[in-house]
Amino acid sequence: MIMKLKFAKRMSYIKASEIREILKVTEREDVISFAGGLPAPELFPIDEINKMNQVVLQEAGAKALQYTTTEGYYPLREWIAKRMNERLGTSFDKDNILITHGSQQGLDLSGKVFLDDGDIVLCESPTYLAAISAFKSYGSGFIEIPTDEEGMDMATLEEVLNNTQNIKLIYVIPTFQNPTGKTWSLERRKKLAELSALYDIPVIEDNPYGELRFEGESLPSIKSFDKVGNILCTGSFSKIFCPGFRIGWIAGDKDIIRKYVLVKQGTDLQCNTIAQMTIAEYLKRYDIDEHISKIVEVYRKRRDIALECIERYFPNDIKYTHPQGGLFTWIELPENISAHDILQKCIEQKIAFVPGSSFYPVEHKENTFRINYSNMPEDRIMKGLQVIGEVLKEYIHQLK
Amino acid sequence: MIMKLKFAKRMSYIKASEIREILKVTEREDVISFAGGLPAPELFPIDEINKMNQVVLQEAGAKALQYTTTEGYYPLREWIAKRMNERLGTSFDKDNILITHGSQQGLDLSGKVFLDDGDIVLCESPTYLAAISAFKSYGSGFIEIPTDEEGMDMATLEEVLNNTQNIKLIYVIPTFQNPTGKTWSLERRKKLAELSALYDIPVIEDNPYGELRFEGESLPSIKSFDKVGNILCTGSFSKIFCPGFRIGWIAGDKDIIRKYVLVKQGTDLQCNTIAQMTIAEYLKRYDIDEHISKIVEVYRKRRDIALECIERYFPNDIKYTHPQGGLFTWIELPENISAHDILQKCIEQKIAFVPGSSFYPVEHKENTFRINYSNMPEDRIMKGLQVIGEVLKEYIHQLK
């Protein structure tokens, strides 16, 4: 009967997110999962959240449970502006900030604000798979720009900008990229800001992992080199506080943010009031840098162990990245090997990861996969990567 | 500089919601506001929420703060299915339910699932203004169908269905409608379900107020007469629990809900985890019917006082509705009077309401306005309506 209904055209190309389907498998406790981008739950500040919830309900009472403005709770927006100015070289105040339902909503709203059917989004190759879904749902196509160890290839980018109609957005994750873990150099950051201004194309600088640096020096944001107001930045409390609250933000030029606010009004009115107030209260009463340094310490160790295990257990002819922070490392297999085949064999042994093909909007490379090292304790990381290594070796052996 | 950027076409017709702009004025404590659809904050179960927050954090711990499934927390979805079956004559289980970021998100997702540029949405005249924004952002046009005391005019609806291309959705609020407070008769409900099946056009049955009945008998939902699976229902905890949590739902045929889930994945991944668990825990440990009956008692009194005051203080030649439940009554002024003029004079005296023109997607009737009676205590309702009455009388007097 349903088949008689006419759905929007976009429904023909919106597919289930492979990650979220794999995550369903990994809900079973006995599965070792490198699949999601899940932060380590044992690091969530549960007691502090419990206390701050109570403080907010005692002090603000019903206001914490009532409707509030679309823009978001202003002390939280003030904190975010100050933080970004200190850490990312921006010059924002609260009116540059819109609180969003996770940074994912910042991407969806960006699609709504900028994209018409048939427009083109430029992105890194590979890129964050749920950004692909978000933009695709507004009918956009993609052009993947190759990346190396310093970030997006600027010569290719400029060539594409010169030769392509309907480019409406450039989407990048310059720090501890998802899925590769790579970080852009200072030069590339500057260059992208220049090209964005030259070609009048807005940039979405997605930055959910930037606070989680294990080593090396912090770099200014691409936004800090923006002279014309073209660059928008997303951020999130999911990785430095907890993801269950669904509180992130998008920041940019006030006139553009005003457009995002209008669009959010019709989308969902506003974000969760008490979640915003609880985070703001936490930031007032606790030292989030101390908390972040705990997270960084744990994740650094997990990254170290993950890279050691990959080095030790994986066959010699694979490549992997060395992330300076964030949650992911990226594996490239020899070209004739499909990560989907490997995943299938690993899942039989209760190990999960995400095959890389989902991270390419156009040219699906089957011989890649992503390893998340933040969510599992060290012994399970070792165990899991050893199994993947054995599966890989056996698979390659059988091919020969 | 910004003007050089190209925004999506939709940005040329997305306007600021008049309500949310007026709400900013009404944030001042000294303003008597009939403007928002705000529930009475003194009725929020603050202590219970505080306790349930703690119980959830103690019992579920980090799980309450971690990512979860897009579909939503399954005990909450089970409760919603059971509730709808008991109260609205549906036959749902948890897989018919998707948790949304307020019922507003159910409308936005409906736009994303069904609407292409140039499609037509049929709605009541007048209708909920943020539904207009939600659907408009997907490029839809509207045809308003006249309503009387029994609901939408079915003869006109059928004529329009017969004579119009590209109709993709019918959007209705059949119980305690926003903005009019009207409730559809049983006959009209049945007839709409029939027409929906006959013409293969899905219906969004928006029902955020249905639990708040002051008098008269509960009616089955339009969905209960759906034989083909075309009808989707939204619901919300905003009016029976608290709006700050932003937890609502959309319910319908499993194959259609599966499409909504896909779309929500790319939009914002999932709703707030702890908010869903806190509500589910509350529903397990407390009697929500007892809580709702308290709300109903207070709102019934406020409606009675509001209608009495309108009768007493307003000029004779205005019309107003007699809602059997919900939050709103609807005022029709003589045709030569603009509610915007009246609002301006009232705001000088620190009284606010929403002029009716925003509730018409096509034919803006300037001589109407909406009164919300749920948010103010009785003495302020009396004071405020007396002032509006005086302003109206003086305005009419000067016209003569």
Image (cartoon, coloured by chain):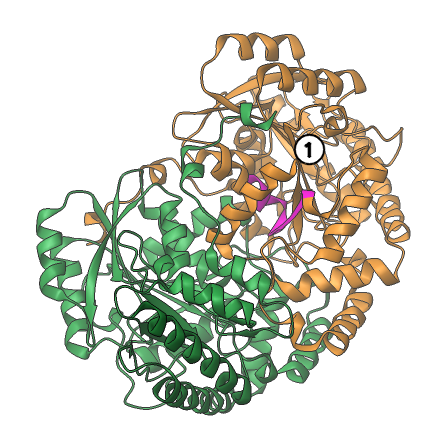
Chain colours: A orange, B green
Residue A284 is one of the magenta-drawn residues: no
Q: Chain of mark 1?
A: A
Nearer the observer, B105 or B62: B105
Nearer the observer, A150 or B296: B296
Nearer the observer, A266 or A290: A266
Quarter of the picture containing the C terminus of chain A is: top right
Q: Residue A36, image x and y in percent?
A: 63, 45
Q: Residue A73, image x and y in percent?
A: 68, 58
Question: Is A4 situated left or right of A29 in this image?
Answer: left
Question: Is A124 situated left or right of A287 in this image?
Answer: left
Q: Which residue is mark 1?
A: A390
Q: Amino acid at mark 1?
A: Glu
Question: Is A69 situated left or right of B202 in this image?
Answer: right
**Magenta-tinted stretch:** A96-107
Q: Residues within 10 Å of mark 1 (few under 14, many from 20)?
A: some
Q: Secondary structure at mark 1?
A: helix
Q: Is residue A240 visible?
A: no
Nearer the observer, B41 or B78: B41
Residue A105 is one of the magenta-drawn residues: yes
Can you say whether B325 is above or below B203 in the image? below
